[in-house]
Image: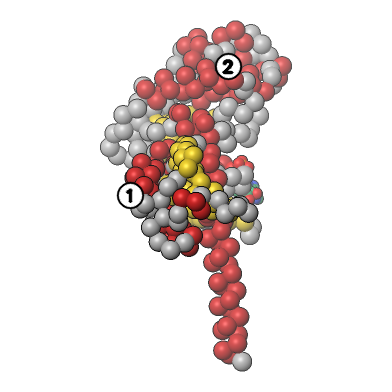
């Protein structure tokens, strides 16, 4: 999925609130041609709101959103964008072929109906009534509407919800073909394995803010992608220093250490778990430091674990900030008194 130059979409310091809820908070983001981008975030993180802003379905309170250098509306009118959203019902009382036909006809660069039905894997559903479809079949029809014309950008909001495993796989094959044809694809998802295997860029939103932006591998590395586990036995000595505290300082200072967890059993055996962004260097340094790790294991963290780590860290950082603000307010009050 070659990445070209230029900007497909650009958010510049975009904010959007609904009453007191800040759904999108100072979002800065550029999508480049040919990228397949996954948008992740816990419930309420602002994913759908960001997609709505991108498509011009909502106006930002502040900041600007540009699509292909112009307004979202201009890009959509020119038929450059296809979207598959969670909201919005399909027409009832019509057949699948009819609704797809209409979408092909109104698109300035519409494809042939048969081709679109084939792409979305719904040829065999063509004569079925739209209101008689299952949830997963309906999703495929929505997908057909998103690819009814030669779009440059395809936006998908949780596209595979309700699809079974086989249909989901076929869906992503079709999506990959779109990306291989040079289209930019942006999709919001709760399925982290989809982001991991499909996207060449992963964005993590949290409370309306972009807290991570990189390849799946980069995000895993940032969260400490691997876990090093082992035991330290008292009979083996306490390493290079003078006891457990010194050992722990050594462990914390190993290259790549992002997190350290130590638990001590009654017999003095310590179980060590290190989250590491560079497990190879970490293990080498462990031996070089004179420690004697028993039952050494190195395991990989998935994107899911990385996601939980990053969003969890963000929550903790905000809790700390809030506590500091409260302390500051209290001490200021004290000072005034
Ligand atoms: N029309 C609306 N009116 C009021 N609040 C809204 C509206 N739409 C969204 N919100 C609020 O804005 C925040 C962001 O919602 P949004 O739907 O963008 O998140 P999301 O990341 O897509 O969530 P999910 O994963 O649950 O779909 C949430 O707190 C939500 O309750």
- Element marked by disc 2: helix
Q: Is mark 1 within 8 Å of ligand 1?
A: no
Tell me residue 244's x, y (percent): 49, 60
Which residue occupies the extreme bottom position in the image?
Answer: 337
Q: Residue at x 54, y 48 (%)?
A: 271
Q: CA distance from mark 1 to mark 2?
A: 49 Å
Q: Quadrant of the C terminus?
A: bottom right
The answer to whether residue 171 is visible is yes
Tell me residue 194's x, y (percent): 51, 30
Observer-nearest residue: 252 or 160?
A: 252
Which residue occupies the extreme front position in the image?
Answer: 235
The residue identified by callout 1 is: 288
Q: Mark 1, residues whose alpha carbon is within 10 Å: few (<14), some, or many (≥20)?
A: few
Mark 1–mark 2 CB contact (< 8 Å): no
Q: Mark 2, residues whose alpha carbon is within 10 Å: few (<14), some, or many (≥20)?
A: few
Q: Is mark 2 within 8 Å of ligand 1?
A: no
* Camera-nearest label, 1 or 2: 1
Observer-nearest residue: 88 or 194?
A: 194
Q: Quadrant of the N terminus?
A: top left
Q: Residue at x 54, y 23 (%)?
A: 143
Which residue occupies the extreme left position in the image?
Answer: 5
Colour scheme in the image? secondary structure
Q: Residue at x 60, y 85 (%)?
A: 333
Number of numbered labels in the structure image: 2
Observer-nearest residue: 156 or 97?
A: 156
**For residue 166, which numbered disc appears in the image?**
2
Whichever of callouts 1 and 2 sits on the residue coming sooner in the sequence is: 2
User: In the image, is residue 24 above or below residue 322?
Assistant: above
- Element marked by disc 1: helix
Q: Residue at x 49, y 22 (%)?
A: 172
User: In the image, is residue 134 above or below residue 197?
Assistant: above
């Amino acid at each position: 999925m070659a990445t070209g130059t230029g900007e497909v979409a650009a958010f510049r310091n975009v904010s959007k609130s609904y009453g007191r809820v800040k759904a999108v908070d100072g979002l800065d983001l550029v999508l480049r041609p040919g990228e397949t981008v996954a948008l992740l975030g816990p419930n309420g993180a602002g994913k759908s709101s960001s997609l709505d802003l991108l498509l011009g379905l909502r106006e930002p309170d502040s900041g600007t959103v540009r699509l292909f250098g112009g307004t979202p509306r201009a890009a959509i009118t020119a038929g450059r964008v296809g979207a598959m959203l969670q909201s919005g019902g399909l027409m009832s009382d019509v057949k699948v072929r009819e609704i797809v036909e209409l979408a092909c006809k109104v698109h300035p660069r519409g494809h042939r109906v048969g081709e679109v039905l084939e792409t979305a894997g719904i040829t065999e559903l063509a004569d079925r009534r739209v209101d008689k479809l299952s949830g997963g079949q309906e999703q495929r029809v929505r997908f057909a509407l998103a690819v009814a014309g030669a779009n440059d950008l395809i936006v998908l909001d949780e596209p595979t919800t309700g699809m079974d495993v086989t249909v989901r796989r076929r869906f992503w094959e079709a999506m990959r073909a779109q990306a291989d044809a040079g289209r930019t694809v942006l999709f919001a998802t709760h399925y982290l394995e989809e982001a991991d295997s499909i996207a060449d860029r992963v964005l993590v939103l949290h409370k309306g803010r972009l807290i991570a932006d990189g390849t799946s591998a980069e995000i895993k590395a940032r969260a400490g992608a691997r876990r090093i586990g082992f035991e330290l036995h008292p009979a083996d000595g306490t390493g290079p220093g003078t006891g457990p505290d010194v050992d722990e300082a050594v462990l914390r200072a190993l290259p790549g250490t992002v997190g350290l967890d130590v638990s001590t059993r009654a017999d003095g055996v310590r179980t060590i778990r290190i989250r590491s962004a560079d497990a190879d260097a970490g293990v080498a340094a462990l031996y070089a430091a004179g420690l004697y790790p028993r039952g050494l294991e190195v395991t990989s963290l998935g994107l899911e674990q990385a996601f939980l780590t990053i969003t969890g860290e963000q929550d903790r950082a905000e809790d700390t900030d809030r506590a500091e603000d409260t302390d500051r307010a209290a001490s200021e009050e004290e000072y005034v008194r």
